[in-house]
Image (cartoon, helix red, strand yellow):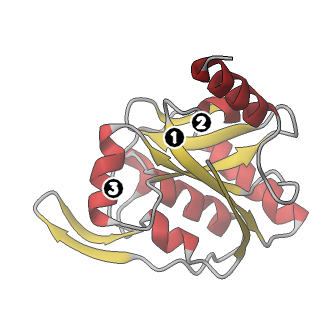
Amino acid sequence: MPLAICLGVAWILLSITPCWGSPPSAGDLVFRQGTEPISDAVMALDQGGYSHVGLLVGQPNEWQILHAVPDDGVTLEPLAEFTAPDNASHYAVLQVDATPVQRSNAIAYAFSRLGLPFKILPADASRGSGIYCTLLIHDAWAAAGLDLQAPFKNINMPLARGRYLLPSGLMDSPVLHSFTTCP
């Protein structure tokens, strides 16, 4: 069988049965190393291995990702699309140590932000004009009463001055666990 067909079949199988070690729950986080130019910019600042994150919503076999991206702002897309090779060179799932009520509240908050423009803002800026991926996750869990205790990074560049939450900072949260990496 030609390699291209084998790879295609393997991708379909991975999309149907993700490589998670334990079953995820709505509200868990899916990190990816993106393939778009903004991912290169994030990786220049943050060498943690991942450039983007989204909130897992829905249910098994119908998982979707709620996240903030430059072209669409806060949007919803199928997990298979979020983790497809065209969009992600690899991804990881981190489970959030939270109650069912906190999960529900975090998801509700994130859904309330659908359509909000993507904007890279320092941590102390008003979120009304836009938001970026890690801050969306941070704010959703904060609204649910869970402090992720994620360290922000001070950045001092001409177009970005202030404290920012980078993917590696979010991954350092002590309330995230069961790290699973997928090809």
Spot occupied by residue 72 in the image (x, y as percentages of width and height): 45, 30
What separation in Å lies between label 1 and label 2 (alpha carbons)? 7 Å
Q: Which circle's residue, 2 or 3, is located before the other in the chain?
A: 3
Q: How crowded is mark 3: few (under 14 residues within 10 Å), some or many (20 or more)?
A: some
Residue 162 spot, x, y in % from top left? 26, 72
Q: Mark 2 points at which residue?
A: 82
**Residue 47 location, quadrant:** bottom left
Mark 2–mark 3 Cα distance, whole angstroms, equals 17 Å
Q: Is residue 24 left or right of residue 118?
A: right
Tag 1–tag 2 contact (CB < 8 Å): yes
Answer with mark 1 or mark 2, whichever residue precedes in sequence: 2
The residue lying at 75 percent from left, 55 percent from top is 27
Asked if residue 112 is positioned above or below residue 178 in the image, the reply reads above
Residue assigned mark 3: 42
Residue displayed at 14% across by 66% down: 157
Do the residues bearing badges 2 and 3 touch, measured as CB atoms within 8 Å?
no
Image position, residue 97 (x, y; %): 79, 73
> Could you say where residue 105 lies in the image, as x and y percent from the top left?
77, 57
Among the two numbered marks 1 and 3 on one chain, the one whose residue lies closer to the N terminus: 3
Residue 167 visible to an observer of this rendering: yes
The residue at the point 48 percent across, 73 percent down is: 169
Residue for badge 1: 88
Tag 3: amino acid = Val
Badge 3 marks a residue whose secondary structure is helix
Q: Is residue 4 shown above or below 52? A: above
Q: In this view, does 84 lie above or below 170?
A: above
Structural distance between the alpha carbons of marks 1 and 3: 14 Å
Q: Measuring 70% from the left and 77% from the top, which residue is drawn there? A: 175
Secondary element at image label 2: helix
Residue type highlighted by circle 1: Ala
Label 1: how many Cα within 10 Å (few below 14, some 14–19, many 20+): many
